[in-house]
Amino acid sequence: MKNITITLDEQTAEWARAEAAAQGLSLSRYVGEVLRKQLPQALAYEQAMNRWIARQKNLKPLRKPGEKLPTREEIYDRPVFRRR
């Protein structure tokens, strides 16, 4: 176990002490449990972000530098969008 020091404003500290007491835990144990519950979510987010970043490196740009974007008419001028 690692000991750390945290600083809380009075209102937060009072609330945390009350929550810890309601669960029968010391304030230190309560803060540790709250952080431990957040760890899997934080790790999953980081992994998802890293996968997304890796995929972005392999994507080709939709247009070349300086090339104009297509107009709305050009995008929708396809047989599937024409009325019969």
Image (tube, rainbow, N blue to C red):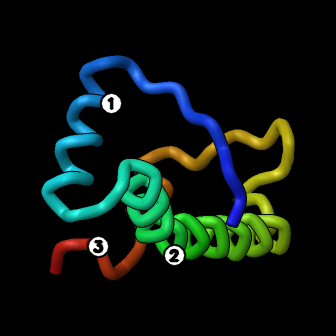
Q: How crowded is mark 3: few (under 14 residues within 10 Å), some or many (20 or more)?
A: few
Q: What element carries label 2?
A: helix
Of circles 1 and 2, the one toward us is 1
Location of residue 58 in the rendering, given as x and y in whole percent from the top left corner: 83, 74
- Give the residue at the far top of this rendering: 10
- Of the 4 image quadrants, the one containing the N terminus is bottom right
Give the percent coordinates (x, y) of residue 80. 32, 81
Q: In percent of the image, x 43 and y 60: which residue is there?
A: 29
Q: Name the residue under label 3.
A: 81
Real-space Cα separation, disc 3 to disc 1, in angstroms: 61 Å
Q: Name the residue under label 1.
A: 13
Residue marked by disc 2: 40
Quadrant for residue 82, please give it.
bottom left
**Residue 57, x across and y down, in percent:** 84, 66
> Is the residue 63 above or below the residue 56 in the image?
above
Q: Point out the tag, 2 or 3, that comes first from the N-terminus.
A: 2
> Mark 3 and mark 2 in contact (Cβ < 8 Å)?
no
Q: What's the amino acid at mark 1?
A: Ala
Classify mark 1: residues with Cα within 10 Å, few (<14), some (14-19) or many (20+): few
Between 37 and 79, the one nearer to me in the picture: 37
Q: Mark 2, mark 3: which one is toward the viewer?
A: 2
- Label 1: which secondary element: helix
**Which mark is first along the chain, 1 or 3?**
1
